Amino acid sequence: PATRLHDLCAERGVFTGETRDGYFVPDCSLVLPEFPPEAVRAAHQKLVRLRDFCHTTKKLRRELGGPPVFDLVDLLTEAEIETPEKIFVGEDFFTIDNDTRRVLRVHPPSRVRFRFKLPYAPGLRFSLAMHPQVWDKPGGDGVIFTVRAGRFVRTMKTVFERTLDPKRIESDRHWHEAVIDLSAWAGKRIHLELSTRTVDPARPDHNTVGFGFPIIVRR
């Protein structure tokens, strides 16, 4: 009430007559024939996700004292991708412990290889997680996250590897932070590869995982 939007909705007769906390909450108080309830709910979820993402991004920038050198998600269109299904790799958003983060989704078995020039005193910062919607799904026996780096593809070496199994281990149902020192290649152009695979390679389904906020920073 007492807003132009409220008055406009009243003039057009689109109120249901029920009181809600907002116009675009899941149970919408508006009658909008061109927007079915499921579309309104989807729009509401996107708005909430965007709000949470902006909040988390601001928090990250405060921790870093400014923006990162670059975000790997922004470089995805330039990356080399090996995956059995195109949808397995892409930008996503995971919400875990009420913490929404932008994610480079790398569903196993997949690998994403970037090539770029590092700044001086470089580091790779990210967080690992499995999407909560698949925690109760069978298969995989855990996911192995691997990061490799090197001046040349044939000489890349593993600089990070970790296994998470949120389906069976409750303590794995959180964000898991990691920072990798890349100073061995400071100021140089390198290949950086992020990959995932399941412990049981015969059961990769229902293992949506990702690297949250994968960024290059100055340490």
Image: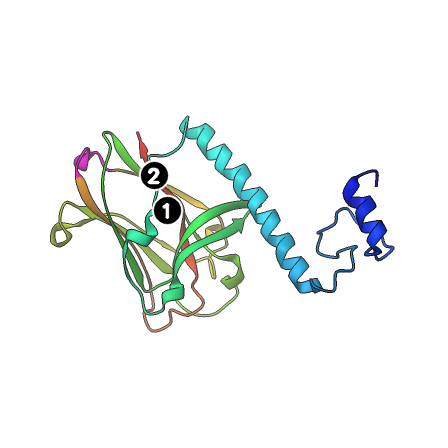
Query: Badge 2 is on which residue?
Result: 70
- Determine which quarter of the picture holds residue 5: top right
Which part of the image, by quadrant, shows the N terminus?
A: top right
What residue would you read off at disc 1?
74
Residue under the image location 19 percent in, 33 percent down: 186
> Residue 83's spot in the image, x, y percent?
31, 65
Q: What secondary structure is found at the residue carrying circle 2? A: strand
Q: Position of residue 209 (x, y in %)?
A: 42, 57
Tag 1: residue type? Asp
On screen, residue 67 above or below 141: above
Answer above or below: position of 65 versus 50: above
Q: Which residues are magenta?
A: 182-188
User: Badge 2: few (under 14), some or many (20 or more) residues near its Cα, within 10 Å?
Assistant: few
Q: Which kind of residue does numbered mark 2 sit on?
A: Phe
Secondary structure of residue under mark 1: helix
Can residue 19 be spotted in the picture? Answer: no
Per the model, the C-alpha gap separating discs 2 and 1 is 8 Å
User: Which percent across, then down, holds residue 180?
Assistant: 29, 39
